[in-house]
Amino acid sequence: MVNAGDLWSGLTLLFSFEALLYCFIGVALGTFVGVLPGIGAMTAIALLLPITYQLEPITSLVMLAGIYYGTQYGGSTASILLNMPGTPTTAVTCLDGYPMMKQGRGGVALLITAISSFIGSIIGTVALALFAPPLAQIAISFGSAEYLSLVVLGLLAVVLFSEGSVFRSLAAISIGALLGTVGIDINTGEQRFTFGLLSLYDGVALTAVALGIFGLAEVIANVGQVEERGPAQRISLRSMLPTGDDWPRSLKAALRGTAIGSFFGVLPGAGGVMASFMSYALEKRVSKNSAEFGHGAIEGIAGPEAANNANAQTAFIPTLTLGLPGDAVMALIVSAMMIQGVTPGPSFLHTNPALFWALVFSFVIGNAMLLVLNIPLVGLWVRLLNIPYRTLYPAIVVLICCGIYSVGTSVADVVTVAVMGVLGYGMRLLRFAAAPLLLGFVLGPLMEEHFRRALLLSSGHLSTFVSSWISVVILGAVVLMVLSVVVRQFRSRRQAAVGPSPADEEL
Amino acid sequence: MTNDGSKAVAGLSPDWFGGVIVVAIGTLAVAVASTYTLGTAENMGPGYFPVMLGVLTICFGVGILVVDTRKRSEGVARPALRPLLVITSAILIFAAVVDTLGLAPACFLAALISTFADKNNQPRRALVLAAVLATLAVLTFKYALGVPAEVFTW
Amino acid sequence: MKTISTAWKTLPALLLGAGIALLPAGAALAQSVPDTITVVVPYTPGATADLNLRLIAREVTETSGRNVIVKNVPGAGAVLGAVEVVGARPDGGTLLLSIVGTHVTSELAASTPPYSLREDFVPVTRLWSAPLVLAVDADSPANSVAELLEQGRQKDGGLSYASPGVNSASHLVGIALAHESGVPMRHVAYQGAAPAIVDLVAGRVDIYFSSYTAIAPQVAQGQLKVLAVLDPSRQDLISDIPTMEEAGFAGINAGIEFALLAPAGTPSEAVEVLRKEFSAAANAANVQETLAASGDAVATGTPEELAAFIDAKFEEISAILASR
């Protein structure tokens, strides 16, 4: 199965000064771009694509891949420090990372996310190395009916883990879903909610929404209190280190997150956003301290961070072994490969074993580089926070503007951030959480797309949704989850009639 | 998530206000989406899903109005109007100006305007800060990253 | 104070002198094409359209010495890129790479874009084209178009066919075939080629009219098979695949045709210069070879031919859309 000769030729291919240098450049750039809000792997890769024409296949691949998974390290930095997702996949990290920062545990959060990211990436890479062909088969067996059940599971998870009133979460989800329908309809080409604006033709940008309702809303809220904020706390080195309990909790969360992330990465089109918040939902569900979530639970950042990194690594599986990129960024990487004369696809492992293994080893080395890079940076970021807020916030505003503008040099995206910022601020005032809206925005259109397509493919037979064992299993899980919540509610109500009532937060 | 410690506006319940707004959004969505082809449940047109979502939104809004208002929540926090307006304007000005004047002026203006959200703003300090930020932004995005934006366009 | 007033006095003189100096240069510029040309590609970087054009652009740069820049302006189904070129100065410095079928269809089918392809643009030359092929799952019982259509007649609901997007060439040809053959065909739109190919390989969708390059790896691995080529003549790369004409459907041809357009008002001398340079580059041996390796065929011509081609496309697509 795995040929030692191939492994060796992969290693020798990788260990050239050029390849290693570009690996470093890629991961460093990826982290940098991930930290910056708005601009992400897509923009960075698109900008660097012409440079790769001049390079060797292994060099350009290693660099582009480095950017891709590198962004998953940097993205959580802004999430934790500023409640502003560096990439949409790290939006979930805001939920517990930012509270940790406010409790003075920002350094701990940054450190744990770096380590969790590393764990997720390494295990994800191992999965890629050893199980690529069978995992690719999973990708093929997921059709629209199966995706739909997954999306339903996701929506349920969002409702369950959201703070505050259920109706508010549900309303936020459905409004987010409505926002997601803006643009042209996939099946008919008809324009929805665009009011003739060309800039809305392709819909509202996910990055702009994430940046607006999390980051910008936070800035507006904080500036209003800039006089009330005391002088910035001096953050000591000691406070950056995780304490006893943190390690085992994070480790377990990271492992669970890795499993979830690896799974979602294999499914083309499922996305890192879904992986990260499914991990969050799971952590909240299995945790003994679930009340802590939303207020600085360390599993709430360890799990999702491991998930989105594992996702980034296993996303290479359908790309390399099927030739089918899972998202637009992967599609760019595929193009870069094809320019080099390398065609990813079913025969890739046979015709290019050296390249495959060189890439796999580059993931290991690249992630190690990232860990070494990011850990000292924790100190730097923490020190940056000591800058008085009245100087910091204009910088954040400029950063938001430039970051979102860089993605497509689109003025429309910048306006979207402003609008979403106002919306996000309004939501805070009225006690609506931001996360459900973002997730509704991602999941709603997916739900519609897969529902309609499944029906089209089956000529209108609804039975298609339960016809494969995958759908049945997933929908079964949904039913079980709903039942368990209902039972729990029932029990707590009964207890309330008898004794003191537990916190009335969930319903 | 919530504005801890800010002054509340007495008498304005976030549940009422929130519920009403949600119902309004839902109604608007249904109104616009019902002009699109609806189709049937088996063969959904582009309008079907949005109308359904709109209806659901209205239901959830009603849920907020009916259920959440039973709890006596504290009033809506007073919105920080000055930061809201100033910062939003800063970003919109960036959007308006970046293609016509260039990245550097846009960053400068955005930074400068946003400093006005701070009540204790000092004009000279603000100008210096804006200039520094504009320079850093251009160096990072234009030169370090190679974003195809013009520094100055005129 | 004093220095400023003297400056004000000399300013008009300076301006006059500069104007006189620039006049011949200005006249010369009006005659020829600028040294830097920007070709707007209305697709994301890295798409096949983009790669092939960059190859041609490099060739033009090398042979003519002109600096050709490729600018990606994706969005709104290739409309945003077109809008950018319409607004550019018509001095030969800006060109649009157009998939003719896409731009024509967006004018006819979707809500009208803020320009007219025939009025706001001047054709320069066609560049290359890629015919579509009819691909099915390797496990499909059909081994020819006739067998496939027969299957469709038997099946409740007819056949399903995938497309990378509504109103794409893959979509339209399905409408045409359904009309011609009388077999009901259900269109299933995907977001791009990749998810369509997944469903095809899994056998969830029956047909995909695809460019050969997109599915070549899967065909080579035996996951997919090609039943026909949608072109009047057989293709060198896949010479054992019959054409649709041979299968009895002479009118069902579809391909993705790339052409260069300039904004209206571009002087015809500039158009001629551009046509010559780009045609020569496209027909260069190495370019032809690279394109042929992925099943694309270089097909250049005169602006008049392109204009006629665009007119024909309008007619063809109107007819297809009307037959729905």
Image: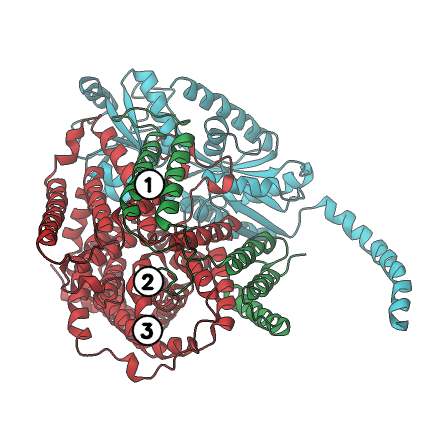
Chain colours: A red, B green, C cyan
* Residue at x-position 23% and y-position 58%: A280
Question: In the rendered image, which quarter is residue A241 located in?
Answer: bottom left
Q: CA distance from mark 3 to mark 1?
A: 36 Å
Nearer mark to the viewer, of 3 and 1: 1
Question: In the rendered image, which quarter is residue C117 located in?
Answer: top right
Horizontally, residue A145 falls left or right of residue B144, namely left
Badge 3 or badge 2: first in the primary sequence? 2
Q: Position of residue B6 (x, y in %)?
A: 42, 63
Of A157 and A467, the residue lying toward us? A157
B147 is higher (above) or lower (below) than C70? below
Helix, strand or loop for disc 3: helix
Residue holding disc 2:
A94
Q: CA distance from mark 3 to mark 2?
A: 11 Å
Question: In the rendered image, which quarter is residue B76 located in?
Answer: bottom left
Residue holding disc 1:
B61
In the image, are marks 2 and 1 on the same chain? no
* Amino acid type assigned to the residue bearing label 2 in the image: Cys
Residue holding disc 3:
A106
Q: Quadrant where the C terminus of chain C lies?
A: top left
C31 is higher (above) or lower (below) than A63? above
